[in-house]
Image (cartoon, coloured by chain):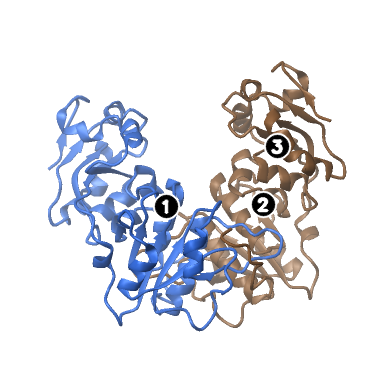
Chain colours: A blue, B brown
Amino acid sequence: MPETIRDPADPRLDPYARMRERDLVGRSGRFVAEGEVTLRLLLGPRARFRAESVLLAPERWPGLAGALAACPAPPPVYLADKAVMSAVTGFPIHRGVLAVGLRGAEPEPGALVPPPPAPVLVLGLAGLTNHDNVGAAFRNAAAFGADAVLLDGPSCDPLYRKSIRVSAGAALIQPFARLGPGRDWLALAETLGLETLALSPGGAGGLDGPDLPTRALLILGTEGPGLEAGLLARARALRIAMAPGFDSLNVATAAGIALHALARAQGRLVPRGPNRGGG
Amino acid sequence: MPETIRDPADPRLDPYARMRERDLVGRSGRFVAEGEVTLRLLLGPRARFRAESVLLAPERWPGLAGALAACPAPPPVYLADKAVMSAVTGFPIHRGVLAVGLRGAEPEPGALVPPPPAPVLVLGLAGLTNHDNVGAAFRNAAAFGADAVLLDGPSCDPLYRKSIRVSAGAALIQPFARLGPGRDWLALAETLGLETLALSPGGAGGLDGPDLPTRALLILGTEGPGLEAGLLARARALRIAMAPGFDSLNVATAAGIALHALARAQGRLVPRGPNRGGG
């Protein structure tokens, strides 16, 4: 049963305290997830992380009790009025659903990639320093069933609060790993038996050819500078065909379009969904 | 030649004053565009709106003088230090590039749609009340060469400051119109000779069929409630195939994927871009 907390200084709420300041400090061993959709993913069978605790406004408890009961090792649940939640976190909490998760150890990239001859779809993010774009790229990776997302050192943290939110919780279920310092994308791809595709407006190939690889590492860079020339020269550069005159796509949208094409070519997609009415 | 302004109370700067408060008030006859990419589109041959004036930090003038000289009817240019710009607008101006544009009269939807038998691609936004999503949808509409974007009454303003920014300026060149009060999407489509496609997770059809229409109105609703059942029942409902287990896409990303597929089927896209190196 949940425990009600009335004192914002209660030490059990310490991991929720001064959230925005902690956002600025960056990574620690914990992360914060907000909102019901995200919490359900964190408690569900596909979560890659363990919830350390859950903090709910009392009125949210009845709707979420079932999801907590279904969790094999349910975390402690604290109930606190939104005023207490806001006092602890330092900003207005509207939805009344927060959780603290534990990062655990990050896997090695190779541990996330099935060995040949299994089909593989990996998304590589190179220098993506915008949390919205990283979150949106994770959402697309999950929607199109990528095996893993790999991030280089400069790319930002998928478990940053805003990244998780923009990912619609995908950051909690989508396997990901960091490219170690000095590790080279193409060397890694070779080790894992993947063909490296680099998405770039200057790419010569398209996405609707019959020869899309069954084991693919798709790398995207930032919208401005794009991928570095050395990487482009060694990878197979693909571009998304666009209309004349406005050759500009958001990087996460570009990832979505390319992942959709690759996943379809690899037979990863469910062609016809259940009839869910207008949902 | 530009005129230097040192007094934040100079009446020529009135249209730039208290920008955030004006954002909250909503539409007027003017809009504000920020940043160099956006300004270049506003001054260029594809702009649908006239710039009333341009306000630059002095150090931005040399880089933009050419774009202003190339404009057939160049607007007045005011130069002001960023401190003056910030004092006028009410928030820190980092990039030092602002412009005020004039909305003019909004066209009728029918005026934007070529008559049969020309191929047509129109994006319809139904109840999109998030400025980021509207801006991102416009960016995708421009990238894939849509003839027009139509918005219903509840959808938010593409010329809101943030919409323009997220659209990467596409809102200034992409033709759009509002569905008048009480106007019905399907009745309008029939009048214009368009087939109505409704994108929905419950849709039965896919996007890779051979029978995509050459005159298409593609309607998207909000991520939560989606499109209303009455509209879905009367339109051809399509879904984007996704991986099992995470059936969730951002609405603008979904628009991008569907527009890409429709534009390709209609032969609107440039299959191979110029070799622009790593750009």
- Residue depicted at x 74% and y 36%: B62
Mark 3 highlights which residue? B31
Task: Give how far across and how far down residue A164 sits, in percent.
Answer: 35, 49
Look at the numbered discs 2 and 3 and tell me whether their residues touch, using CB distance below 8 Å. no
Q: Is residue B154 above or below residue A13?
A: below
Mark 3, chain letter?
A: B
Mark 1, residues whose alpha carbon is within 10 Å: few (<14), some, or many (≥20)? many
Q: Left or right of A107: which side holds A162?
A: right
Q: Quadrant of residue A244?
A: bottom right
Mark 1, chain letter?
A: A
Q: How far apart are marks 2 and 3 (CA)?
A: 14 Å
Frontmost of labels 2 and 3 is 2
Mark 2 highlights which residue? B170
Q: Quadrant of the C terminus of chain A?
A: bottom left
Look at the numbered discs 1 and 3 and tell me whether their residues touch, using CB distance below 8 Å. no
Mark 2, chain letter?
A: B
Task: Give how far across and how far down residue A78 sits, in percent.
Answer: 18, 37
Q: Do labels 1 and 3 share a chain?
A: no
